[in-house]
Amino acid sequence: MNKSGKKTGKEEKNRSKPSLNFIENIIEDDLKTNKYESKVHTRFPPEPNGYLHIGHAKSICLNFGLGLKYKGKTNLRFDDTNPIKEEIEYIDSILEDVRWLGFDWVGEPRYASDYFNQLYEWAVKIIKKGKAYVDDQTAAEIAKQKGTPTKPGQESLYRNRRSVEENLDLFERMKNGVFEEGSKVLRAKIDMASPNMHLRDPLMYRILKKPHHRTGDKWCIYPMYDWAHGQSDFIEGITHSLCTLEFEVHRPLYDWFLDQIVEGDYRPVQTEFARLNLSYTIMSKRKLLELVEEGHVNGWDDPRMPTISGLRRRGYTPESIRNFADKIGVAKRDNVIDVDLLEHLVREDLNKKAQRVMAVLRPLKVTLTNYPEDKIEEVETINNPEDESMGTRKLPFSRELYIEHADFMETPPNKFFRLAPGREVRLKSAYIIKCEDYVKDEKTGEILEVFCTYDPETKSGPGAGRKVKGTLHWVSAQRAINAEVRLYDRLFNHPDPAGQKNQNSNEFLNPNSLEILSNCKVEPSLKMAKPLGKFQFQRQGYFCVDPDSTTEKLIFNRTVPLRDTWAKIKDRP
RNA sequence: UGUCCCAUGGUGUAAUUGGCAACACAUCUGAUUUUGGUUCAGAAGAGUCUAGGUUCGAGCCCUAGUGGGACAACCA
C-alpha cells in the first residue's frame, strides 16, 4: 500500500516533468542556485571556414533551443581568428543556414575579431603579471620542447630570461609589424610538465601578415582559439558555453585564461557533449571537402552531402531536422545515429505537407483498346489524404497511358497484385483495367507495351463498384510532361565509414549513390512546380524540385522513398 | 607508458531521493486503406561491460579491471 502510493506519486511526477538531458540538468541547477542571476545565455560559434553540416545543426538546435526553452538569449558568433582559412562566402552561407533552420540570434552576429583590441589589452595585463612571455623559437623547436602526452616538456630559453618590460616591448613591436611572420609568439607561462598538453605554455598570439576579412590590415598578430574563445564568451555574457567533446582537454586552459581576466563573480562555464555521427555518411569538414574536390559529389550542396545546404536541396524540411536534433538527445558518449531516424522524420513531416502527384519514373505504355481514340476525360483526385484542406485537382485520362515498368510482370510471383496477363488493377482515381495482351522484345525479353480493356462501370468516386487488390499510379501519354528525376542513395555503403581503423572512408563510397532517370513522365500540373517545391510521387517517395529545374526542363530530386514493405517481401529468400 | 572522458535492447536516449529498466527508430504479426504509403492494434528483443564493496535494496554510490574515445597544429 505504502509502496504503491509511492509509485503513483512518481508516475505523476514523470508525466508532468519530462526528463532532461545532462545540460538541462546543469542549467536547472544553476537556475535554482541563482547562479548568473537566473539568466541563460548561449552561443553558436562557427569558424567561417566551410559549410555547415547536420552535426552543426545538432549544436545550433541545442544552443538556440536552450535559449528559447529557458527564455534566455543565444548569440551567433563567428570564431574568425585565423585569416588564412576564413572567407566571407562562408559567413553568408552560415547565416543563411541558421536562418533556414528557423533560428534567430539576439542582436547582430558577433565576431571574435571585434574583440581583438580587448584581447590585446588583456594580453598586456597578463604579461605585466609575469604570466606570459615572448618566445623567439621556431614552431619546430617549440613543438619539440612540448614533449608528448606521456613525457613532460622542457622550458623555453626565453621563458624566464626576459623581464616584464622586455616582453611588453617585444609584444608591442610584434603588434606593430616589426618582426617577421613566424619569428616570435606570445606564450602563456603555465606548466611545461603538466600532464595536460594544452597547459604546456600554450601560444596566445602568432604573427600572420595576412589581411583579415573584417579587420583588413589593422592586425598582424592574431589570437589563438584558446586565447579568444573563453574571452569572447566572457565579453558577451555567455553563461553556458557548449562545445563538443574534443575540447574537453581545453577546459583547464579555458578556465586558466578566465582566471587571469575575471574580476567579478560572473564567469562562463564550458560544458562538452558528444558530436553527432550519422550512419552511412561522414561528418569531418576536411573529408567532406575532399569529396567535393575529388569530384565524388557535385559541390557542397550536392543532395548526397550531409551539409545543411545539401539536405535542403535534397528536400529535407527545417522542421524534420529540428525534430531530429530533438530526438537524438544530448549526451557524452560516442554515438552513430541511424540515418533511418532522419528519414523517418522527414517522411513524417512531408506526409502531412506534400501534395500527392502522379509521376511515372520508368514508363511502360498501356493502350486501352476499348477507349475512344480522341477522348480525353478529366478525373478528379485528392491532393493529400492527410489534409482535406489541400483540396482536389483534375487529371487528364486517355486511351494511351504510361504506368510504372515494375508494375507489370509477365509471370508474377506469389503475392504480386499489380498488372499481369489476364489480371485486373485499378488506376488510381480512374478505372479498373484488365490486361489482355502485351508486346515483348523477343531478344531482350523486355516488355514494350501492354494492351488492356477498361471497365467503364468502375470510375472512381461514390459507387465505384467492385474492388481489386492493386492500385497503380499512371499518367496520360498525350498530356504527360517529361522530367528528369535524380534518385539518391546513401553516399557510403558502410554504416560507419569514418570509424574503420586503417581504412580510408573513401574505400566505402557507394558507386551507385546517384541514378539519373531522364525519361520520366509526370502529370501536367507539375509544369508550375517551383524550385524546392515538395511533392509525394504517389507510391514512390517524396521529391523536391531541384534549383536547376526550369519550365523547359523539370528536374526532381528524390528526398526519400516511401516505406516499401513489398520490396521486403519480394526480396525474401 | 601519462592525464581526462565514456560504457543501458540492433541504434539512440531516459530512468530526477538508491525502489518493478522506459521511450523513439529499426525488426516482426494482424486490421484498415482507391498509395504494398498513412493510421490503428499487437509481438519480440536488454537485466544495464566485468569483478568486488556499501546497502534491506545498486543501472545509479565506492574501488579495481576491461573496452572505446580525446590530447603532442604558430587550426578551430
Image (cartoon, coloured by chain):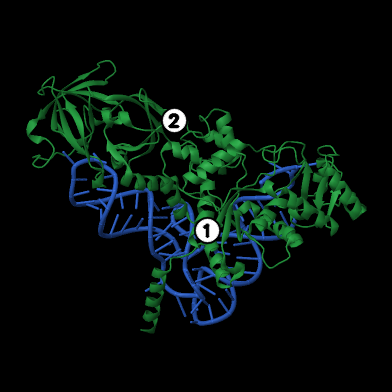
Residue A148 location in percent, x, y? 77, 50
Please tell me how many numbered marks the rendered image carries: 2
Tell me which residue sits at (51%, 30%) in the image. A297
Residue A395 location in percent, x, y? 20, 31
Name the residue: 53% across, 66% down. Answer: A25
The front one of A352 and B36 is A352
Q: Chain of mark 2?
A: A
Q: What is the three-letter code of the residue carrying label 1?
A: Gly
Image quarter of the N terminus of chain A: bottom left
Which chain: green?
A
**A366 left or right of A485 in image:** left
Residue assigned mark 2: A512
Q: CA distance from mark 2 to mark 1?
A: 42 Å
Query: Do the dots labelled 2 and 1 sit on one chain?
Result: yes
Give the numbered dot on residue A67. 1
Q: Nearer the viewer, mark 2 or mark 1?
A: 1
Pinpoint the chain carrying mark 1: A
Q: Could one spot residue A37 in this view of the protein?
A: yes
Q: Quadrant of the C terminus of chain A?
A: top left
Name chain B's colour. Answer: blue
